[in-house]
Amino acid sequence: MEFSEHIKTANVEDVVLRQPLHPPSRGALCVTGHHLLFSVREEEGGSSRQVLLLLRNIDATEKSVENLSGYSGLFSNAGRGERLDICVAVCHPCCCRYCSQVLQKEMCQQHCSNSLVSHTLTLVSGSSGTITIKCKDVRVLQLDIPGMEQCLNIAHSIETLSCLDSVSEMYPFFYRPADLSLQDPWGLSSPEKHYSQMKELHDRWRLSTVNQGYSVCPTYPPAVIVPKEINDDMLLKVAKFRQRGRFPVLCYYHRKNGMVIMRSSQPLTGANRKRCREDELLLQVVIDNSDKGYIIDTRSSQQAQQARMMGGGFESKSCYTGWKRLHRQMERGKALQESLIKLVEACGDGSHNMDRWLSKLENSKWLSHVQTALATAGLLAECVERDGHSVLVHGSEGTDSTLLISTLAQLIMDPSCRTLEGFLTLLEREWVQAGHPFQQRCAHSAFSHSRLQQESPLFLLLLDCVWQLWRQFPLALGFSEALLLRLATEAYASNYGTFLCNSDQERCSLEVKEKTHCLFQALLRPKEREHYSNPLYECTELAIWPSVHPQSLQLWRGFFLRWTQQTRHLEEAQEEIRNMVIEWGKVVLS
Amino acid sequence: MEFSEHIKTANVEDVVLRQPLHPPSRGALCVTGHHLLFSVREEEGGSSRQVLLLLRNIDATEKSVENLSGYSGLFSNAGRGERLDICVAVCHPCCCRYCSQVLQKEMCQQHCSNSLVSHTLTLVSGSSGTITIKCKDVRVLQLDIPGMEQCLNIAHSIETLSCLDSVSEMYPFFYRPADLSLQDPWGLSSPEKHYSQMKELHDRWRLSTVNQGYSVCPTYPPAVIVPKEINDDMLLKVAKFRQRGRFPVLCYYHRKNGMVIMRSSQPLTGANRKRCREDELLLQVVIDNSDKGYIIDTRSSQQAQQARMMGGGFESKSCYTGWKRLHRQMERGKALQESLIKLVEACGDGSHNMDRWLSKLENSKWLSHVQTALATAGLLAECVERDGHSVLVHGSEGTDSTLLISTLAQLIMDPSCRTLEGFLTLLEREWVQAGHPFQQRCAHSAFSHSRLQQESPLFLLLLDCVWQLWRQFPLALGFSEALLLRLATEAYASNYGTFLCNSDQERCSLEVKEKTHCLFQALLRPKEREHYSNPLYECTELAIWPSVHPQSLQLWRGFFLRWTQQTRHLEEAQEEIRNMVIEWGKVVLS
């Protein structure tokens, strides 16, 4: 595909950019295949400042035309050309503000709920248009563009190019900065390296390459850690008994007491209560020397029962003796996506009504999801660290809430996950390699009007939970809030290949590791490492048990309000602390 | 009065103290005239730790008896002796858990809403009791005391001694620490000093001693700053026209543009629209060289109208030409007190329900009051700094919300108020000397069951608003959150005389300045100064305009949740930053 096909107007002069926390600026706008580039006019800014926005970061756009018969209206994303869909902003009087066509009362009601009314409108040249750009990192920008046709052309380019489906045409495949080479190592760790670092478990666990070529489980890496007593033939049978082939694998070994965390997908018992001896044996050998193990099912007991009707299921007490099932219902999918949409809408509410804000915050339920995630991770960590039992975690597919709580539990228990490098390695292992479908989940964020398919902000919820930990234990984590903010942006739109695709297999077939740069490696370069480190970090060997009292959890203002309120001063304070530490370090060293 | 009259049992051994964020400890309890002293048993603690609690800090107590026929019940504060009021904690089955007397259904319903049921109960010796102590600084302690009679004696002593009315018997009159002398200077500033520091206004303003001996206005200091053209005879007439004699006085001079803030009480126009030429002249001469002035009335327009029926009123447009009235309704009195009670109740709610917490937080309306206070102070500062007009502030009496917003506006505009010393001086001038009735307002805090009279947490609301400023501008204020927390505690119960009484007159007649120590002086001693300074402070000459968007304002967790959640780690981080700055300073100096 040629990007130029979608760019009718590439350059416009005299555009006004309005962005939060900045005064409006006038300059030239340029649309390329992957970016919006805005260059501030030199005479105004002194040095020519530029604003570069990845088109992929754009979640939704809105067009409106000013000074057209003295009225303004809002165009839908759908219409283009001479026939336009118009949503009249105010529904009194109940007629179109452009052509005075009287609208039916039903239509008027539709207006009030922001639906669209279609009728014909002749384009008027000489007018100007405004494009409101709502980004996936919850920033909202506005471009005032002279000339309605230019405005519509630009808007069309943005709409088309911002949601291209083809991964290999995305920007990471074109990003070639001078200080990075495609020959640089990709990624921070591998299942092989992870296994070799844990000598203590070599007598009971082995590295299996049964998934070489992704033939058994497309969403697992080629090598996984499994009990020594289970050979590859048995694994094949277990894989057939687990949804999408995600058989139980080890993800964490707790050095203090030798207990482990495993994760998988649900067993496919179905309505007929099918069994798989190999699956039962696999779990049996894990707890051989211990009294019992726990299965944390991230669905309610009722949901697990219902899943049986669809061919899924759960580990029954009678077949998996020695394992105790705990059900903790965690929201995922659509419910979580809607929660995010409501929260972001509440954060953007410009009214000065305190009650309304608090009630919208409550109504979004986002903080309840944060609470549930931290509480379930706490339960998992308690099972392992306090009670000394091994745990298997799964929900349905094992690619979402399963990863969320296994990651958080490791942060709670394991100090080596709490360094900057350790945390990135953890994310690489538990999210990228373990098959979280980033491309599906992060296709859209909180603003998109398009019908949502597989979108769900699981990774953002993880980052929010990590931020809560970070806030409750300001000395215990080696990274800064800035890292969490950076990751939240990168997951949705990135120069790097790390969060591309839905699985290792897809990344392999698209040669992502050969043709793009690795975000995690880039974040560990000296300058970045300095910026993303926590200046107050002091390693502690202790588990950090988060408080999950509602009173202890807060809105992550750094992310959700970063474009709407003045967090600049907070950043100043952080910067001040950082400088102090650096200066002090220099003085002490000299 | 002899305190010993109220102490039947002075010492009890084998008491268990349960306090938040600490494990329970066993030791000896001692009741003195002003304190509860708990000494941890030596063999347990190693070194003998002591907990000293000012009885004045106790807002409410609850007694309950354990192991009495195997049941526990809750006693009201009212009953003592053989006849006791009992509230049965659980109302199923509907009979008294002590004597099995069957209760009527109505009584049962009363239980559920925590009302009391009276019937006779014989004291049983050998049982033990628990006293729950709810402090004015929102801490909740529990004492398990062996022997029911001892428990009741202790409880009675606490109840009586914690709310003595006689000021001269309060602890500040007995507090004699080795490192302070009664000869030390009392207070940080005086009207005379304040006036002498502002040479620029000497040609238009004078220091009047019309209130010498508090004959004109008991709630003003003996000297006040008034327009030069208004002589003392005129002031006497103005005082008669203003509620409680609080005629307009200068409280702030804005050096940048020569504008001033004045404060007063409402004019006594009454239903007949009475006028006072001297009052009108006083305001007229203030804006002589400027085009107009603003009157910020902290009541709604309707409230101000209603006040006329009660003899109060407002400055009418026709009589006060050149002055424009702005009404901003601010809650005070009972509404604010109830808001605090609801908030503290919500903070203590131990349920894990996130929705319930957010809805209780909203329902308390505390954050709305914070928002209104900051918004009104912002309006005042805008009038002075941005628009260049002088402003008179008053509500009804001018001793509550008037002081709140004049203080906040000065913090917003004036960098000299933002240092540790400057802030304390501001509080001394605008709250202590200006006649905020601390004794009435802070007699009880959020837990008291007694019928509230004049209580209202205006000063706490001020500290909360200052904290919001501090959080939004972490570099601009020279003091730490710890100072705000300390002041919040001291206002309700203190070793010092600073917040005693309701006015300068009362303090004078009780010789507070001669017989007690000054808190503000104590806070400026080197060690305290270090603890209460902001290590990140960088003076800025600019006004610090707070954001009052609902999204920008937060619950002051440091105060409201300091005993219920783990803020220890946050304090650690603050301590770390402080140490770093100190160490760095040493290195740089050496």
Image: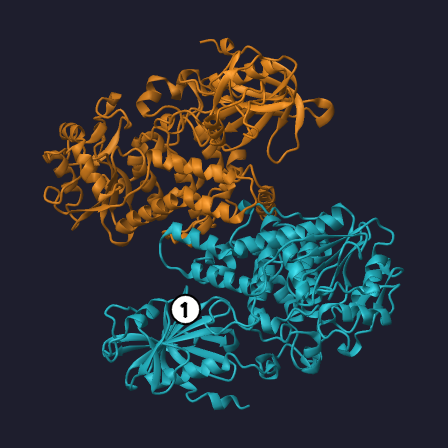
Chain colours: A cyan, B orange
Which residue is painted at 67% across and 61% down in the image?
A: A395
Q: From what the image shows, is residue B3 above or below residue B500?
A: above
Which image quadrant is residue A274 in? bottom right
Q: Position of residue B479 (x, y in %)?
A: 47, 42
Viewport quadrant of the C terminus of chain A = bottom right
Q: Is residue B402 left or right of residue A252?
A: left
The residue that mark 1 highlights is A19
Q: From what the image shows, is residue B322 above or below residue A102?
A: above
Which residue is painted at 54% across and 65% down in the image?
A: A334
Q: Is residue A320 left or right of residue B587?
A: right
Q: Position of residue A583 (x, y in %)?
A: 60, 55
Q: Is residue A135 left or right of residue A130?
A: right
Crowd tier of the residue under label 1, counting other residues whose Cα lies within 10 Å: few below 14, some 14–19, many 20 or above: some
Which residue is painted at 56% across and 20% down in the image?
A: B36
Q: Is residue A305 left or right of residue A103?
A: right
Viewport quadrant of the N terminus of chain A = bottom right
Q: Position of residue A275 (x, y in %)?
A: 79, 64
* Chain of the residue on which disc 1 is drawn: A
